[in-house]
Image: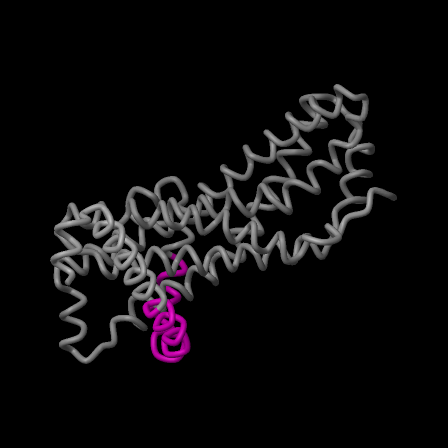
Amino acid sequence: MAFVIQSRFPRTARRVRRASNSLDSLGRHAVFYGRTIASIPRAVVHYRTETIRLVAEISMGTGALAVIGGTVVIVGFLTLFTGGTIAVQGYSSLGNIGIEALTGFFSAFINVRIAAPVISGIGLAATIGAGSTAQLGAMRVAEEIDALESMAIRPVPYLVGTRVLAGMIAIIPLYALAVIASFLAARFATVVIYGQSSGVYDHYFSTFLIPSDILWSFAQAIFMALAVMMIHTYYGYNAAGGPVGVGIAVGNAVRASLVAVVTVTLLISLAIYGTSGNFHLSG
């Protein structure tokens, strides 16, 4: 029957095959993510030293990445220039309608809710995530993961669980640095470059900066780190095809993690600010 359908309706057969492959891939992702989350307690108990080493590697980088300061410097510069761009655009746009004094409000609102989380997630995917995919992929094609299994070492807790845990630990100071950098850059651009009074900027900034927004922003960053690390470790752990396959795995992982970053931002924004917005234009 399948042969008859494939021969008489080739387009329909291809579409069915693609849908089946997509469902199979989704199932493999779900099973791997479940195993990863279940392996985190074992990583905490048995592989604390490896987790600490990975936290240091993720934060400061290794090899050529360590020369420029690793993920700390990259994420810091990304959010620094993003905060400056927000100030420039906000001052110019608000100045067109005569309310450039509200640039401080613009910085407090946009940086915390949108810019800093998304830019930090992109930086994580491009540095921590891509590095983890390349490392695990190289180990897979070199049969090092099979060697761990032959030594009765569970590869998922040792290789995947520790990396996911390290990423979730490292994201907290990294994101704190990112938020501070975005705030400083926005203030510098508004006060020093455009010459707005520092008192006016600080008044509107402190008035409209909601502490709960910062806490939700950190929660959003942690969920992003979890999604990015699980996606990248999946593609690295299941890489195949030699060095070319590792490169393909890194590309696929970065693409999927970038989609995950904006998806997490959308879902959390809908969950927290979807009805009321948690915002009142008063003060």
Quadrant of the snapshot with the C terminus: top right
Task: Say which residue appears at 64% left-offset and 47% top-offset.
Answer: 113
Q: Quadrant of residue 4?
A: bottom left
Quadrant of the snapshot with the N terminus: bottom left
Tell me: 172 left or right of 196.
left
Task: Say which residue appears at 19% left-offset and 80% top-offset.
Answer: 152
Q: Quadrant of residue 138?
A: bottom left
How far from the left and from the top, in percent, is residue 234? 30, 60
Task: Say which residue appears at 46% left-offset and 57% top-offset.
Answer: 225
Out of 134 and 4, give the one closest to the viewer.
4
How far from the left and from the top, in percent, is residue 157? 32, 73
Q: Main secondary structure of the magenta part?
A: helix
Q: Residue furthest right?
A: 283
Q: Which residues are magenta?
A: 31-56
How far from the left and from the top, in percent, is residue 143? 13, 63
Out of 97 and 185, give the one closest to the viewer.
97
Task: Say which residue appears at 17% left-offset and 55% top-offset.
Answer: 5
Number of numbered discs: 0
How far from the left and from the top, in percent, is residue 123? 44, 44
Tell me: 235 left or right of 152.
right
Tell me: 282 left or right of 87.
right
Task: Examine the rendered structure and indicate whether residue 106 appears above or below residue 141.
Answer: above
